[in-house]
Image (cartoon, rainbow, N blue to C red):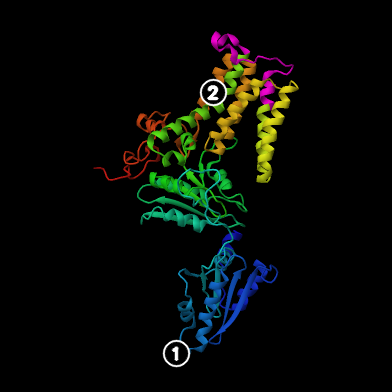
Amino acid sequence: MEKQNKNMVHIYDDIELVEKYMKDRVGLGTSFDLGVRKLKVLKKDIQLYYVNGLCDSVLIAELLEHLLFLNDTDRQKQGSNIFDLVENQLVNQSVQPIKTMDELVDQVLSGLIVIVVDGYGTGFAVDVRSYPGRTPQEPDTEKVVRGSRDGFVENIIINTAITRRRIRDERLRFEIMKVGERSKTDIAIGYLEDVADPDLVDIIRKELHAIEADGITMADKSVEEFLLKQGYNPYPLIRYTERADVAATHILEGHVIIYVDTSPSVIITPATFFHHLQHAEEYRQSPIVGTFIRWIRFIGVLASLFFLPLWFLVTLEPSLLPEHLAFIGPNERTNIPIVVQLFIADLGLEFLRIAAIHTPTPLSTAMGLIAAVLIGQIAIDVGLFVPEVILYVSVAAIGNFATPSYELGIANKIVRLVLLIVVAFFHTPGFIIGSTLYLLFLINIRTLNVPYLWPFIPFYPKALAQIIVRRTVPSSKIRPSHLHPQNRYKQPNE
């Protein structure tokens, strides 16, 4: 109720009341970065509100110069409407009239300047934003050998601009809204109006408008948790990307992209399990090379899941191995059970990964060498690990790093540890039942009403073939059916 009453407060005709409101409610005069510039134009008081650090001071100086120029022009002194004269002097491509005090406050705190004229219950919001931030550069987590290097940054305006640069279609839409009672974070949803499923767009729009929180300072991750409500399911239900070309490709397929200001990554919705196994590098190579890279990646993901539990199983039941593969089991024995060694080694790698994140880059490389060479070898020498444990844990870890999605890699590691526990207690039946339950768990997941394992389950052979084999761009004419696109064909059907 309080929020509705605040929205109904119109801009005061008396400019002194506007200033009092800004002092009482917003902190004008208390917060050093919130300022007001007072002018007198044609004997009328004018006030300009701004936030230091979010505005381009050069543009503001030009606007002030044009406004003060009115005092030196005789023609406008002949009883002209001062409000219209001020509007005409605002030489900026984005000038928006506003009528409520809540709009005035929101626009000022968003980095725009607001100009109010004494005696008129309307103000002008002028977009002179100049957010601090970095220039577009290649994301660290999605590097390619060849390809564009202009990844997303923390500025939502730049992010939508470099997307529109790739899709110059008049039907590309970017709907913007503010979320968070206190943070008032800008969020935009991007989609092709004649391609994206209207129901999907409507669901996402309603869910974003329904977010009730003080703020979403964790940006896209906070939005994800409000949007999907996945609880403690470790598997990612949406895909993040920091590459503009990847985002543009998904928009053309019929996905809806969510841009959150202050975040250098965007949210791709909906995203299945197989979306997290794709990488831009596959499409920067020839189809056969891209297919080869994709298969190697699939093998790496499978290794990260099942390699350690399978090896542990054959150490518990050597009879499962044929005689010519008997060397796979551990050739040495220690007083520590193999399952404990596996957990110590696997969690130890996780310690190193976390430590590397918090370690400056020049030191993290040295730390990795120390961990790999010294700690591993000493652990073997003192009898803590058998050599095979280090080998197979390392192979599983490499499979984790080969997974394109960081979130999927962590989820797979959790499943791997659970499978190790099940195998330790129940041996072969435990591995079979655990793997079956894992598959059933993935089958039951839905992301925005889309089956998580589409097109494997439910089975769509043509779509699954495109996942297994990287097809050429000219032959990929049909958009994915799980998105329910309004226009099924990417290219004219000849």
Residue indicated by mark 1: 75
Local crowd size for mark 1, using a 10 Å CA cut-off: few (<14), some (14–19), many (≥20):
few
Q: Position of residue 180 (x, y in %)?
A: 58, 54
Residue type at mark 2: give it. Leu
Q: Report helix, strand or loop for mark 1.
A: helix
Nearest the viewer among 186 and 402 is 402
Q: Is residue 18 magenta?
A: no
> Of the numbered discs in the image, which one, if any, rests on residue 310?
none
Q: Which residues are magenta?
A: 316-344
Q: Position of residue 314 (x, y in %)?
A: 59, 14
Pick the quarter of the image with the N terminus: bottom right
> Of the numbered discs in the image, which one, if any, rests on residue 437?
2
* Residue in the image at 56% along x and 21% along y: 434
Residue type at mark 1: give it. Arg
Q: Is residue 319 magenta?
A: yes
> How many numbered tags mark residues here?
2
Nearest the viewer among 494 and 311 is 311
Cα separation, mark 2 vs mark 1, equals 82 Å
Q: Quadrant of residue 12?
A: bottom right
* Residue in the image at 55% along x and 8% along y: 323
